[in-house]
Amino acid sequence: MKFFGLAESRDQEWDPNIPMTAEGGPFDRGNGLRQLAAFFADGRFFVSKSHTNNPLVLSLMSEVRLSGYPDIRIEPVDITRLQMCYESANAVRSSGRAGRDDVRMRREVLSLVGELSKRRASDIHIVVGEQSCVVRARIDGLMTHIAEWPPEFGHGFCAAAFTMADASDVNYQPYEYQGARVSNRKDLQLPEGVISLRLQFNPTTFGGRAMIVRILYSSDQKQAADLAQLGFTPEHMEDFETLRAKPFGINIVAGPTGHGKSTTLQRNITSILQEHNYNIAIYTVEDPPEYPIPGAVQMPVVNASSSAERAEEFSKAISAALRSNPDRIMIGEVRDAASAQLSFEAAMTGHQVWTTLHSNDAMTIPFRLRDLHVDDYKLCDPTLLTGLISQRLVRKLCPHCALTTAEEDLSFHLLSRLQAANIPTERIRRQNPKGCTRCGVGNGYIGRTVIAEIIMPDVGFMEHVMNNRKLDAERYWLTQLGGRSMTEHMIDRVMAGEVDPLDAERIVGPLIPPRRD
């Protein structure tokens, strides 16, 4: 995989004490290769211990030999030794190259994002330490090792990413917490299919730095209103339609970070617009907006330097949206008591509100709102709190290469849980670690799918919430309201052979159906 590769002219006289693979050298093959190897004119060929059989390294060896250096001496070394090899090359850089270096580093940022966007990575984690910089990406929900760089390159990479931002703090502060956003604009074109990048910078121990790049992708208008494509069941779709038809009330989507809450909101809001032929006023308040929603007025909350200032700006934006005579309001997240109070105020004044909340499941949402000091007379009114939704994203097996499993290949505990859930062993499918041409070699998955639950409370359900009887409220939902939990949705997907049971349990929990008695 190619992440780097900007070589400059080679018309300068070359210092024999500097690697010939250094920038501008006779064998300059880009920064990507410089993380793996260093070749000197006297035949020394330093190679990263963990990359001795890397195709880029083997290709360079062949090229060096064919170029008149047959007696090379291969020496496996640590990445710190490779870093030292190039320090002298870095030392001779003139100060006049600083501007060109910044442009080059920006290109490296776009190159990395472009390569990983092809693999549909949701985020990139770049952690700079004392001795090295480790790059990992979350692909289909799992962290994957991508590369290892010298720390100086990592610091430069993070700084370049910050300078590309269109909404950020005033100056880059290597030892401060900072956030920023990079979006498509006239002077910056992001890779195809990427609409924006969310950047989070965190200081780490011993002068280190961590940058998390959240990649946000575009979708066509047909997909933008298709909730079923995300993995929701026909029953879920019917519930969403019912909630969208209510004239007012709060509908909350809960779940951990990175499990598709914003995508669900975006597609729901687009559905509302299409159902009303766009003859409706919808305002959104987001910190910052993640996805464009044509037809909605999206109000960003940016450039706040502290959490208190951000909360204040968020509350101001919600108040402004309420004064704008909207038919529907989307609030990116209920994050504190002020935003929770304003959300209920909007519902009490005749608005339909869609928002998100960090909560473990749908049943916990009203109790989490109580922690945010929402009054019980508001919280326990089913005409105000109308929809409780919770979701997770689980990797979806490739249907072309998924493997069947015999009972003897399953652990005793997993087999017991499968039997308790009435899932026949012959229905189980597992990941094929070899992958195939459809999903990619060494993969075995084709993206992720939603596992969800939806509660539409009534008076009986809210009586249990009022009296703080969570288990009774759950039993009432399952027995009297015909509810189906995330676990039951997960069991259906395992039964259909669409998800690996171990993957599902890792994300949702044990395959144990809820009691309905």
Image (cartoon, rainbow, N blue to C red):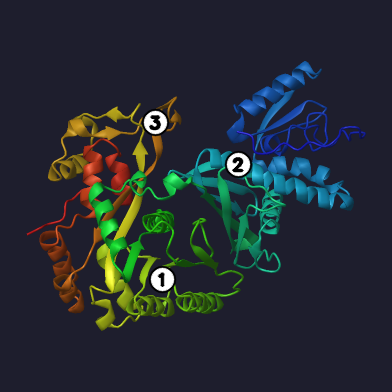
Q: Amino acid at mark 2?
A: Gly
Q: Quadrant of residue 502?
A: top left
Q: Secondary structure at mark 3?
A: loop
Disc with the residue nearer the chain's start (1 vs 2): 2
Q: Secondary structure at mark 2?
A: helix
In-image side of 143 versus 469 (left or right): right
Question: Circle 2 is placed at which residue position?
Answer: 114
Depicted 86 relative to depicted 202: above or below: above
Q: Nearer the viewer, mark 1 or mark 3?
A: 1
Question: Circle 1 is placed at which residue position?
Answer: 334
Depicted 135 relative to depicted 328: above or below: above
In-image side of 20 versus 513 (left or right): right
Q: Amino acid at mark 1?
A: Val
In-image side of 266 versus 253 (left or right): right
* Label 2 to label 3: alpha-carbon separation: 25 Å
The percent position of residue 53, horizontal first and vertical second, equals 59, 26
The percent position of residue 504, horizontal first and vertical second, equals 30, 45
**Observer able to see residue 291:** yes
The residue closer to the viewer here, 433 or 171, is 171
Residue 433 tag number:
3
Quadrant location of the N terminus? top right
The residue closer to the viewer here, 172 or 224, is 224
In-image side of 379 versus 315 (left or right): left
Q: Quadrant of residue 199?
A: bottom right
Crowding near pointer 3: few (<14 within 10 Å), some, many (20+)? some
Tell me what residue is drawn at x 10 percent, y 60 percent. Answer: 479
Q: Amino acid at mark 3?
A: Pro
* Label 1 to label 3: alpha-carbon separation: 40 Å
Tell me what residue is drawn at x 70 percent, y 41 percent. Answer: 81
